Image: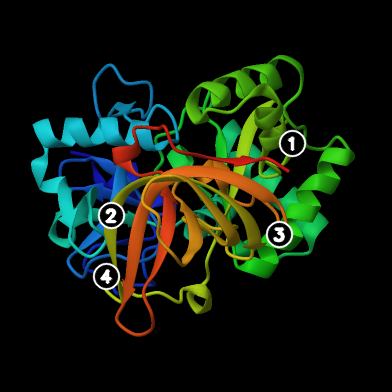
Amino acid sequence: MLKDSDTRSSSSHSVGCKKLRKEKDRDYLRTIEDLFFCVVGYTHPPDRILAYLKYMPNPEGKWGSKQRFERMLKQYDAQSVADGFKLLKKMYPKYLYHDSINGITFSAVPLESIAEKYHPEEKVKQLIARKDLDPLEQKAVSLIKTISNQSGVPIEKYGITGSILINIHNPDFSDIDLTIYGRENSLVTKEAILELKRKKVLQGFQGKEAEEWVKKKEGMFQLNPKQAKLLLERKWNIGFYEDTRFSIHPIRVESEIKEEYGLKKYKGKGFSQIEATIKSADESLYLPCKYEIMNIQIQEGEIVENINELTSYEGIFCHFAEKGERIRSRGKLEEVIPKRGKKYHRILVGSSEAQAKDFIHIIK
């Protein structure tokens, strides 16, 4: 097990202390077995938190110091998450949960199995207060200050997630993964990052890195080279800072969390492929990202009316399509059944059942 000294500097609070806030996307949890899970989304069952397995103890692992860890999520995609389910089923079946509300089986951490919770915004405060930062921590703080100065968004609205958050990073190869809280702060930060890239303070993917990124995404999401390049062009939230790769992820503040667990049920109805026009991309910043769609043309799957929504748990499609664009998408067709209001349908990208064969393509 991890000792107190291994985690105290990276945790927002311990289990048993007063709860500071609801668990949010990109928070982390450490279990009583020293498994690290990354929280997914904002709505969770009352007795557990939906999250995917990210790191687990392994003496041969490349992360950590006194205790070594292996990274279990090799890629940030639904197929890698599904591979994690297989491992949990074999070794830690209590962390697999059949969610009857959402109609899925997903990994989830029971509340009684949580040993520690980690909140990205608290990590920033801790690093700024410390004097003994390693080179990667120094660079992460410097990056946040640089973005904050350019955007005018206060430093306390940013967070640090990933291996730095849970204090198992390796300064030789770990990335810097940031969070930004609130819609307006996120939009301002987007413009700041684009400007910092124009000033060459930050660098986008270029040359060999861009070619490798495009080639990898072609294989994962049935993209042709032109579509993959467009996807990379629109990925404002990734790049390099002083030769270290970084990412930044918009996170909802409390007032932006509108849904509660159990207010909607989801019933799977097979798979569909559609063409549609983006009616609104206002909710596409966050994970899961949501697009309102209209002018639907069903190309494959059951013929249904009122497909109003396209939702993706594949983070690569967040803030990708724009209002008025025509898209093609393949995903799980779900009937959405609210406790109040009318039923409707949605296309879900990123389900484990799709086996990484679902996608969103911009066609014009």
Q: Give the amino acid type for the residue marked by disc 4 in the picture.
A: Cys
Which residue occupies 68% across, 65% down?
A: 185
Q: Which residue matches tag 1?
A: 233
171 on left or right of 81: right
For mark 2, give the secondary structure.
Answer: strand
Q: Which residue matches tag 4?
A: 17
The C terminus, quarter of image: top right
Q: Give the amino acid type for the residue marked by disc 1 in the picture.
A: Glu
For mark 1, give the secondary structure.
Answer: helix
Q: Which mark is residue 268?
A: 2
Height in image: 89 above or below 337?
Answer: above
User: Do residues under tags 3 and 4 come within 8 Å of each other at their CB atoms?
Assistant: no
Q: Give the amino acid type for the residue marked by disc 2 in the picture.
A: Gly
Total marks shown come to 4
Q: Mark 4, residues whose alpha carbon is within 10 Å: few (<14), some, or many (≥20)?
A: few
On the image, the x and y values in percent for residue 176 come to 57, 38
What kind of colouring is applied to the model shown? rainbow
Res 59 visible: yes
Q: Tell which residue pokes out farthest to the front in this image.
A: 303
Q: Tell which residue pokes out farthest to the right in this image.
A: 199
Q: Which mark is residue 193?
A: none
Q: Which residue matches tag 3?
A: 323
Q: Tell which residue pokes out farthest to the bottom in this image.
A: 340
